[in-house]
Amino acid sequence: MKYLSMWTFLIIYAWLLAPGSKGINDLIMMKLISGQFTTVEPLVVMVFSCLGLFPLLFASLIIPNDSFKLPGWPFSLLSFGLGAFALLPYFALKGEKSTKNRGFSSLNKWLTSRTFLLFLLTMTLVLYLYGFTTGSFSGYTEAFKRSQLVSVMTIDFFALTWLTYILFKGHRYRFVCVLPILGPLILLLTTNNKKNNTPLNTFFSIK
C-alpha cells in the first residue's frame, strides 16, 4: 500500500501540483536536455545527474534478485527514464517469490561487483563535490519555482531516496540511506567486503 500511495502522490504532483513552466517554455529543461550544463544551477545539474545513477543502483538491487512473479528487469530499465514512477509499481505488484532468479549470472555478478559499486560511488562523490561546492540552495529554490522539470525531478529524487531506505530495513545501519545513492552504496560495499560473503538479500528486503 505504501508504494502505491507514493506512486499516486507522484502522479498527482507531476500533473497538478508541480510549479514552474513546462514544455518548451521550461528553459531550464531545454538547457539540460541540450547539454548546456554550465548555464544551469550546479545543484540542479547534480540532482539531474544523480537521477541517472539511481537506476544503476536499483539495477544492482533488483536484477540479481529478480525471482518474483512479476519480472523486475523491465521496470529497472524503465526507471532510467521514469525513475520512481517506474519502480514503485513493481514493488507494489511483484507478487510472491519464485524458486529461480531470472537473468544471466555474469550480469548479476557484474552488477554486485566491487568494481561496479565503486564506480557508482566515485561518480556520486564527484557530483556531490560539484553541486555542494559550486551551487547554492537559493539558486536551486529559484529553479524549483521556475521549472516544472526541476520540481518533479526533486520529488522523484526524494522518493528514490525513501525507497532505498525502505529496502534496507533489514540492515542495522540503514540510516545511512538518507544520503542519496551514497548511503546504499556504502552498505552494499561493506556487505560485499565481509569475509563470509553474506548474501545481500540478508540486508535488504523487497517484500
Image: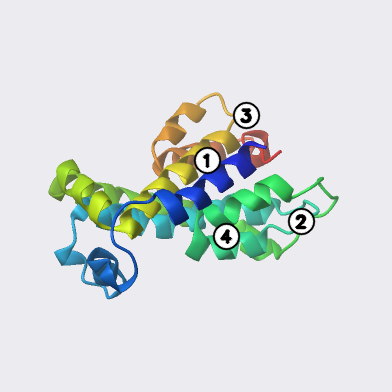
Residue 170 is marked as 3
Disc 4 marks a residue whose amino acid type is Trp
Q: Real-space Cα distance between discs 4 and 3? A: 23 Å
Q: Which element carries disc 1, helix, strand or loop?
A: helix
**Residue 113 in sight:** no
Q: Nearer the viewer, residue 182 or 68?
A: 68
Question: Residue 182 occupies which quadrant of the picture?
Answer: top left
* Crowd band around label 2 with a 10 angstrom C-alpha radius: few (<14), some (14–19), many (20+): some
In this view, the mark in front (3 or 2): 2
Q: Earlier in the sequence, mark 2 or mark 4?
A: 2
Q: Earlier in the sequence, mark 4 or mark 3?
A: 4
Q: Earlier in the sequence, mark 2 or mark 1?
A: 2
Q: Real-space Cα distance between discs 3 and 2? A: 22 Å
Q: Which residue is mark 4?
A: 110
**Residue 108 in sight:** yes
Q: Which residue is mark 1?
A: 164
Residue at figure coordinates x 58%, y 57% from the top left? 86
Q: Real-space Cα distance between discs 3 and 1? A: 12 Å
Q: Which element carries disc 2, helix, strand or loop?
A: loop
Residue at figure coordinates x 73%, y 49% from the top left? 93
Q: Is residue 113 left or right of residue 186?
A: right
The number of numbered badges drawn on the structure is 4
